[in-house]
Amino acid sequence: MAATLPRTRPARLPLRYRLQRLIGHQHWIRRGRDLVLRRLCDPDSAPPLGFTVPFFGAVYAGRLDNFIDWSVFHFGAYARHELLLLADIFDALAGASGAPPAFFDVGANVGNHTLFLAARGCPVFAFEPFAPVRERLLEKGQLNPQLSIRVLAFGLADRDAVLSFTPPSGANVGTGSFGGEGAPASLALPVRRGDGAIAELGLPPIGILKIDVEGFEAEVLAGLRATLGRDRPVILFELSDRTRDTFATEEGLRAALYPNHLLFEVGTRSVSGPYRLRPFHFARTSEVLAVPAERLALLARRVAGLGA
C-alpha cells in the first residue's frame, strides 16, 4: 500500500513561478511536465531566486538555480518516487519495532532525502563532504530544529583518507565524485571507513541506508561490510555504469552486500510519479533496492511490488 504524500503550498512568489509550480504539481500528468517547465525555467539558466516552501511537515529553503531545489519547488520533491518508497519502508519498520529506524544518507547533497525522512520521525545521519552543498543541508537543519538530523562532514569509503574530488558543474551540484574520470579533480576531501567511523562515533544501528555517490558505491559498501552484516538494513542505491564496472558481475555486487538478500529494480513512470518495483537485472537496472530476506514479508505488507 503506497504512502500518501501531502501537498505543499508555496510561499508568495511572482505569479509566473507560482504557475510553474502549479503545472509541476499535476502528478496525474505522466509525460511532458518536465519538458514544459524546463522551457519556462531551465535549472541551468534559472535566476538565483530563493524560496521557502512547506515540505512534508518541515520547511525547505532553496534556490531555483540548484537542480535539486528546482525539482522540490516545481514537483514538490526531488525523486519523489524514492521518497514514496522510503516512506513505505519507514512505516513498515517503525510499525513492527515501535521505534523509528535510523536513516543513513550517504551522499546527502542539499538534504532532500534527509529532510523528508527526518520529518517522518527518523533520526538521520547525513554524510556530505562537499562544503557548498553541506552548507545548504545545514541550513535546512537550522530551519527545522525540531528534527533529528546529524550532519557529518566526510564521505564514506573503504579506508580513512583524503581523496581527490571532482566538483560538479552546472545546476546539479550532486554530480561531484571521488575518483571519477573527465574533469581534473581540484579538491581534496576527507573520507572515513564506515565501520570504523560508526564505531568511533557511537552511531546507532542502520535501519535504512541510502547511497548516492556517483559511482563510488562499491567503496562505500566495502567500508561498511561489518556494519551491514550486523545491522542488515534496507538499502537503496544507484547502479551506474561506473559502479557496474567496479563490481564486474552480479555476483560481485551481491558479495558486497550481506548474505540472504533480495534485489529489486526501482523505477517510476513519470518525473514525479509513484515508485515501481520490478525484477533486478544487473546489466540494465540503474536504481536498486536491497532487502534482507527475513524482512521481506514484513515489508511486503506496506511496500507495493515486494509481495509479487
Image (cartoon, rainbow, N blue to C red):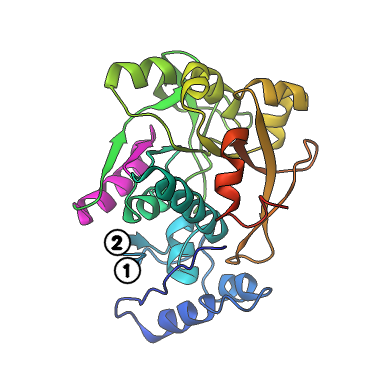
Please name whichever residue, 308 or 20, is drawn nearer the observer in this view of the structure.
308
Residue drawn where x is 46% and y is 28% of the image: 186
Amino acid at the residue labelled 2: Ala
Horizontal and vertical percent position of residue 101: 39, 41
Q: Is residue 296 left or right of residue 229?
A: right
Horizontal and vertical percent position of residue 134: 34, 41
Please name whichever residue, 18 or 126, is drawn nearer the observer in this view of the structure.
126
Name the residue beneath numbered marker 2.
Answer: 58
Name the residue beneath numbered marker 1.
Answer: 54
Horizontal and vertical percent position of residue 263: 68, 38
Q: Secondary structure at mark 2?
A: strand
Residue drawn where x is 55% and y is 46% of the image: 298
Magenta span contains residue 226 = no
| Residue interval drawn in magenta | 123-145
Residue drawn where x is 57% and y is 75% of the image: 27
- Would you say residue 246 is visible in this rendering? no
Q: Secondary structure at mark 1?
A: strand
Relative to 27, say whether 166 is above or below: above
Magenta span contains residue 135 = yes
- Would you say residue 293 is visible in this rendering? yes
